[in-house]
Image: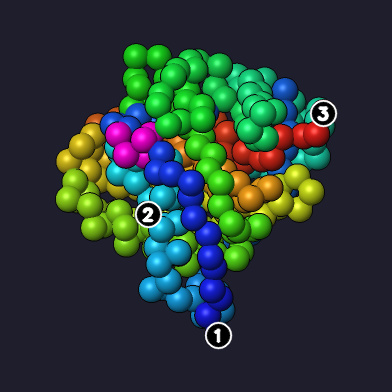
Amino acid sequence: MALQVSFSFTNHNPYWQNHTSKSFPSISLPKASFLKQKQSQPQNANDPNKETLVQSLCSSKRRQLNLSIVALLINGSLPNSSNNIILAQELELARYTDYKEGFTLLTPSSYVKVDKAGATVLFEEVNKGSNNIGVVVNPVRLTSLGEFGSPQFVADKLIQAEKKKESTKGAEVISVAERSGHGGLQVYEFEYKVDSTRGGMKRIFSAAFVSSKKLYLLNITRSDKPESPLDSHTRTILEEVLHSFDVAPVT
């Protein structure tokens, strides 16, 4: 029997509706395991509650924060370990923690924090606002992402939604993964690329988790045009940002 999920957002975040072409010392997370095939658990693709969540997770460049997962290339380490701190220093990353909303992540030192309606927090590369890192937090009735569906199921729904947009010329999932966050928290991550009439080719790295009946969404958007493709060093930085997204530690 397909899993039935009942939840709703309290409102539609204007950041998702109006965002235009804007694309983040340290807690390290265990590495993700790639899911190369769909899980066998049946999913109800027509569940209106699931469609609502997918629509919230899937956005055009006007809806910045999409649910996505990236391949994890950097070996994990324990929280506050010297290896992790050294790596963050080498990549010029600094930790940002929002204790009020309950999340934490690393951000590139070269990015600046900006205000954006609907975004819980948004960081942009100086003079290149289309390269950005944002987080949105919304209440849900779920207690974990697993109640909604598998990472592969979410990735499939995500790309389907992207391809339906008038501005989308093409969309493709690169990788799908799941990892454990603080206290065994279930975290989904994706990497995908979108070719759009609004900004050209972009690489998207995203992560999501549910904690305390809140859905936390991280979206990292980076231009990946043929004339200026994403380089390996920048990719490593963005992946480390992605892997650092977690629930905030209890103070």
Q: Which quarter of the rendered picture does the C terminus lie within?
A: top right
Residue 241 at x, y percent in the picture: 58, 34
Which residue, as the protein is rendered here, is positioned at the far bottom? 1
Percent of width and height locating residue 21 = 30, 32
Disc 2 target residue: 55
- Residue 230 location, x and y as percent? 39, 34
Query: Which quarter shows the N terminus?
Result: bottom right
Q: Nearer the viewer, residue 37 or 157?
A: 157
- In magenta, the rendered stretch is 14-18
**Do we see residue 240 in this rendering?**
no
Rounded to the nearest angstrom, the CA distance separating label 1 from label 2 is: 24 Å
Q: Which residue has dot 1 on it? A: 1
Neighbours of disc 3 within 10 Å: few (<14), some (14-19), many (20+): few
Label 3: which residue? 251
Q: In this rendered view, identify the residue nearer to me: 203 or 232.
A: 203
- Of labels 1 and 2, earlier in sequence is 1
Asked where in the image residue 55 lies, by quadrant, the reply is: bottom left
Kind of residue sitting beneath label 1: Met
Give the class, few, some or many, for how many residues have Cα within 10 Å of label 1's Cα (few <14, many ≥20). Answer: few
Pointers 1 and 2 in contact (C-beta within 8 Å): no
Q: Position of residue 96 (x, y in %)?
A: 63, 24
Label 3, label 1: how far apart the Cα atoms are: 42 Å
Q: Are marks 3 and 1 in contact (CB under 8 Å)?
A: no
Q: What is the CA distance from the residue labelled 2 to the residue labelled 3?
A: 34 Å
Q: Residue furthest front?
A: 10
Residue at 66 percent of width and 40 percent of height? 246
